[in-house]
Structure formats: C-alpha cells, structure tokens
Amino acid sequence: MDFDAVLLLSFGGPEGPEQVRPFLENVTRGRGVPPERLDEVAEHYLHFGGVSPINGINRALVAELRAELADRGVDLPVYFGNRNWELYVEDVVATMRDNGIRRAAVFTTSAWSGYSSCTQYVEDIARARTAAGPGAPDLVKLRPYFDHPLFVEMFADAVAAAADTVPPDARLVFTAHSIPVAADQRCGPRLYSRQVGYAARLVAAAAGYRDYDVVWQSRSGPPQVPWLEPDVADHLSTLTGSKSVIVCPIGFVADHIEVVWDLDHELREQADAAGMAFARAATPNADRRFARLALDLIDELRDGRRPTRTAGPDPVPGCEASVNGIACGPPHCAAEWSPALSPATPTAESR
C-alpha cells in the first residue's frame, strides 16, 4: 500500500486566553457538563497563559517527521490537523484534496484501542472526508502502537532518567487518563485498561522494575458514574511507606494539560506536602524516535509486514468488537475509507 502524504491527527488545544472557553465548550458539547466545571478547567489553561502545550509539541513532531523522511530519502509531505481546535482536520483534508493528495497515512497521538482513543479518530477521518467531498484523499489510520519497541523504549528511558533524580527506593506508578467503566467495555471487555496494563508491564520490565502500580487520572463527569480507579491522587495518599515516587504518564504521548497541571502541579504539591520525593517521567513529545515509530507503522502497511511488537506475555490485548459497524482496531486501522462511510455521532470521553 503506497502513500503520497502523512497526516498527524491530534486532539487540539487553545493557543491564547480568548480561546480557552470556546475550546472547552467545543470539546464538551452535548455532554451536559455544567458551566462551573468548565470554569474550573479553564483555570488550568489560564495558569499557563491560556496556551495548551499540545499544538507546539505536535508542530515539533511534524518537523521531526519531515526530518526523518528527508534522512531516509523519502519525499512525502506531512500535514497536521486536530479534532477539537484549529487546525481542524476537516480544513486540513480539504487542503490535501486541493494539493492533489490521493492516499495518506494517518498517525494519531493516541497509542491505544478503544472508542475515544481509536474509533473516534476513525469517525474524525470519515467526517473530514465527507466534508471534503469528491476528490477527498483516502485516509488510512495507522494501528495502535502501545507495544511498539520504540514506544516501550522511550518510556523506559524516561523512567530511568526520572529515577536518577529521586532516592533508589522510589515507588513506580504508571498513570493514564481515566474513562467511564462502561466506556472501557465498549470496544471489548476492558480493552483500553488491559492495553494500558500490558504496556506498563513492558515498560517496567524494560526499566528493570518488577513491582509497580497502574492508576488513573483526570476523570470528569458526575460522581455517580463509575470511572476507572484508583485515582492517582488517592493512590499517592496510600503510599505511606514510600519516601519517593516516580510517576510515569504512560497513557499520554505528550505533555498536555492533564500532564503539566494534574501531575506536575497538583500531584507534585500533594507529594511535597507529604514529604515525598517526586519525579515525573517524560512523555515522548517530539522525540525523534516517536517520528521513527510513526514511519515504521507506515512501512508495515507499505511492505505488508507483520506488526513490530515488543515481546511480552500472550495474548496481546487486541480488538474484539465493533462500534456502530466500525471495527475497533486493525480491521479499520489498515483500511481505505471511502466517501460512502458515514461517521457516527462523536462523543468525547478522553484523549
């Protein structure tokens, strides 16, 4: 399968104080989130000048993708679009159409299967192609990559670097974005949470840890709705026998608000108050290895190769169901999308 472009598809974020509230309203539209909750989250962004780090990180990743392609002698343009803010993916796909792009590989900033992590990006792709109309390029979403060797290597190296800054008996805690328990069943029994646990096991082993914890963070929504637990803050309060902690945000590929506010600000304050040494492992961000990972996924499709995976316990948590007729995983991640595919109604749950 040949490609004539690459599309980096991400979540989006505000880039100025005046954009914060419209962005949050866009993300939560139709979900019944009360205004006071939006005000609370807006303060997180305003703490950083109303600018989310995510767009800048993604632009840097685009530069790394272009540099890696150039080093390989491959002439492919790289485009960048978002689900929830400028540059909107609908506008980017229209530009790709006007530039004569016929088939593009789509690399998303989520390593996981599951509805909001994978299938919703498929819906974004379908919606963007429909908006672009006749002549829209075929868009092929690359597969989830939570067990790719470079994904594991980047996080293992980050854990090791963090460990150098705290006492040697630090407790290793992996965290990922919580989602409703019902959503974790949507694309197969506990698909997302099992993949997070599987990746944590691979990274811990690569970093030399036998014992570690997997917890969740950044939940939202009414308290009567069950979400994945334990929460990272609640868990930290139980580590009374630990003098130090390493928190690895394995569920995130970039340092966006849920990392720099929830972990670097709130959780660090909690650890400081408890007299606990705290280190937060870095995310991939715009690491050149992340660009290499994306291009490796493209090579798998182009060359018809089996997926490159880190050796681990069997079975690898895969995709066992479909959503609204759209398969959740490799069946749609290696398919060409036609204008006839109509997207389901998107419902944001997490990144």
Image (tube, rainbow, N blue to C red):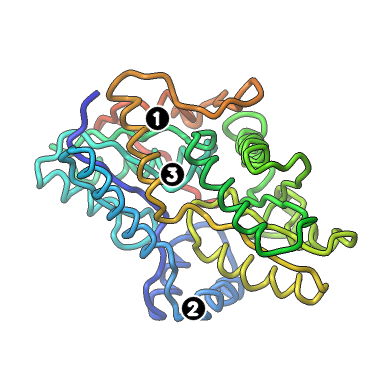
Relative side of 15 to 229, left or right: left
Residue wearing tag 3: 345
For the point 62% across and 33% down, which residue is it?
191
Q: Which of 146 and 292 is in front in this view?
A: 292
State how far apart marks 3 and 1 are (Cα): 19 Å
Q: What element carries label 2?
A: loop
Q: Where is residue 332 in the image (x, y as percent from the top left)?
A: 40, 28
Seen at 21% across and 32% down, the residue is 3
Circle 3: residue type? Thr
Return the residue at label 1: 333
Q: Residue 22, located in which quarter of the rendered image?
A: bottom left
Q: Does residue 219 appear in the picture of this structure?
A: no
Residue 293, horizontal then vertical, whole percent: 40, 39
Q: In this rendered view, identify the residue nearer to me: 283 or 161.
A: 161
Q: Circle 2 is placed at which residue position?
A: 48
Quadrant occupied by the N terminus: top left
Query: Which mark sits nearer the N-terminus, 3 or 2?
Result: 2
**Relative to 213, is 3 above or below?**
above
Q: Relative to 217, is 292 above or below?
A: above
Residue 288 picture location, percent across and down: 37, 49
* Dot 3 crowding, Cα within 10 Å, few <14, some 14–19, many 20+: few
- Element type at mark 3: loop
